[in-house]
Amino acid sequence: MIDANRTGDSIGRPAGWIRVFVAGPPCSGKSAAGAVLAGLLGLPFADLDRLVERAVGTTVPEIFRTRGEAGFRAAESACLAEAVGGGGEFVMALGGGTLLDPENLGLVLAAGIVVTLLADPAALAARMSAQRAARPLSGDAAALLRLLEDRRAHYAALPNPVDTSGMTVTEAAEAAAAVVRRALLS
């Protein structure tokens, strides 16, 4: 699962002191910026999609093909609950639809800080076309734009938004780190 068996750090933070959940639509940079964010914060990184793949024993597109979206979401929710219940500090990239489930949303809000990476639809579509990874619910630009429209209110309601339009991965991670630091001080 997540290597989060830390006992504290040099400034006296106890283990479990910080958990950051990186949310947002597909192609917003959750995985890439999340990994850099974890490095900036000195925390372990986990990608929820990779945890699901490990638990199920196959890829996300194959899970969607054989079990459907409901089967994927059930596995995703179980892996999220296990990671949160396991204790320790981490940064976790969530799937684009993870927080559509009110139980998942409540879980992450209670367990840590949610940072929501956003970008304008044109930037997200451009990023998607540059990637070669299969995306079960947003396979092409038109599907992505439909998904973004369907979920617009959902993403807008999530906390701690960071607009990554025009940012590099490192810039997005630095902006997310600033949000985390502000949240910790409040």
Image: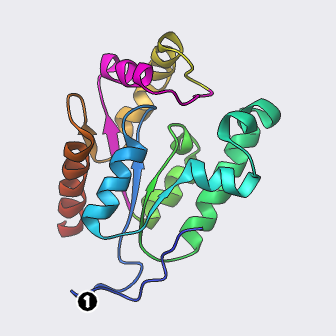
Closer to us: 88 or 167: 167
Residue 60, position as x, y percentages in the image: 66, 39
Whether residue 7 sits left or right of residue 120 in the image: it is right
Q: What element does badge 1 sit on?
A: loop
Q: What residue is rendered at 45% in x and 15% in y?
A: 145
Residue 168, position as x, y percentages in the image: 23, 37
Whether residue 154 sits left or right of residue 107 in the image: it is left
Q: Residue furthest right?
A: 66
Q: Amino acid at mark 1?
A: Gly
- Magenta includes 124? yes
Span shown in magenta: 113-136
Residue 9, position as x, y percentages in the image: 29, 85
Q: Which residue is mark 1?
A: 12
Rendered position, 136 above or below 141 = below
Quarter that holds the C terminus: bottom left
- Magenta includes 73? no
Q: What residue is rendered at 52% in x and 42% in y?
A: 95
Closer to us: 69 or 157: 69
The quadrant holding residue 89 is: bottom left
Closer to us: 36 or 15: 36
Q: Residues within 10 Å of mark 1 (few under 14, many from 20)?
A: few
